Image (tube, helix red, strand yellow):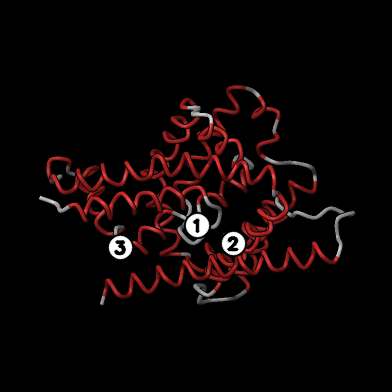
Amino acid sequence: MEKPAFYFKMILSGILMGISMVLPGTSWPVMAIILGVYEPLMLALNKLFSAPKTLTRHDVKLFLSLIIGIGPAVFVTAYFILSLLMKFAFEINAVFIGLILGSVYLIYIEIKKKGFSEFLWFFLGIAVVVVPLLFGFKISNLRFFATIFGSRMLDFISGLIVSTSLPAIGDTIMLLLLGNYRHLLNAVRTFDFTTLLIFLSGFLIGFFAFVRIIGSLLKNYRSQTYAFIIGLMMASITSIWPFTRHTYDLSRVILFMILVAGGFLISFYLEKISTKKVKHGNG
């Protein structure tokens, strides 16, 4: 029988994981690693999907405790983040950019080979985002996605893509790339369960269908895959750039630089902690 300390730790871990699901630049796998619950959670999930009869009471209690923490944390964090985005768009976007740059640096140092092929894939990643923007194109702005059916499809696609994102990138950065971040935040805030269920269905299907594909790409084309991802992330900054032609003044530029530096350090610090935790656990 588990002690009260077990439930306290799991619920608290769930709360922190739920917050990291909403905050840009963070991801729940990184938070789970930091908290030391990633491995037992993955083992329990593996049992659930491959051999449900092997699940133990401990596994069930682990799931329930985490869900109790994750659920309220996601809704509460989404509410406050959306409010902050409305009131402090400049400041929040500056922090977002810092988080993206921090993630880019962490992925860059994972690239062992830096040759012509990697540069080609890097520029291809930039082109995928920048070229459509030059022509005023954004996936969420397509006329098809303005329809009810199209909007639902974008929610489903968001779930698919988020399920395949890497911990270093962060789920929310993928949603920013799709232009669907605020919409899903609002769905959480307003308890739009139809939108959330469609997103979740896309996430689950993507999780099972594409995890092996991404694993294969990282195994066989690791450097090229990371280079492409860096290109995507660098280009995504253009969609949240907080300045316009008439807003470049010294005080705002200084504030921007400070906030970007803060976001960078947060991303870097979280990844370093998770890396140490993994090494410690393997040691």
Judged from the image, the secondary structure of the residue bearing numbered disc 2 is helix
Q: Is residue 194 above or below residue 220?
A: above
Q: Residue furthest top?
A: 148
Q: Is residue 124 visible?
A: no
Badge 2 density bin: few <14, some 14–19, many ≥20, Cα 10 Å = many
Specify whether 97 is left or right of 57: right
Q: Which mark is residue 99?
A: 2
Q: Is residue 110 visible?
A: yes
C-alpha span from label 3 to label 1: 16 Å
Q: Is residue 37 above or below residue 21?
A: below
Residue shown at 70% from the left, 41% from the top: 138
Residue 53, given in percent of the width and then of the height, sits at: 12, 40
Mark 1 in CB contact with mark 2 (< 8 angstroms): yes
Q: Which mark is residue 36?
A: 3
* Residue 251 sits in quarter: bottom right
- Mark positioned earlier in the residue sequence (3 or 1): 1
Residue shown at 40% from the left, 38% from the top: 205
The amino acid type found where label 3 is placed reads Gly
Residue 68, given in percent of the width and then of the height, sits at: 32, 41
Residue shown at 58% from the left, 45% from the top: 81
C-alpha span from label 1 to label 2: 8 Å
- Mark positioned earlier in the residue sequence (3 or 2): 3
Q: Nearer the viewer, residue 238 or 230?
A: 238
| Quadrant of the frame with the C terminus | bottom left
* Residue 257 sits in quarter: bottom right
Q: Tag count in the figure?
A: 3
Residue shown at 24% from the left, 56% from the top: 40
Badge 1 density bin: few <14, some 14–19, many ≥20, Cα 10 Å = many
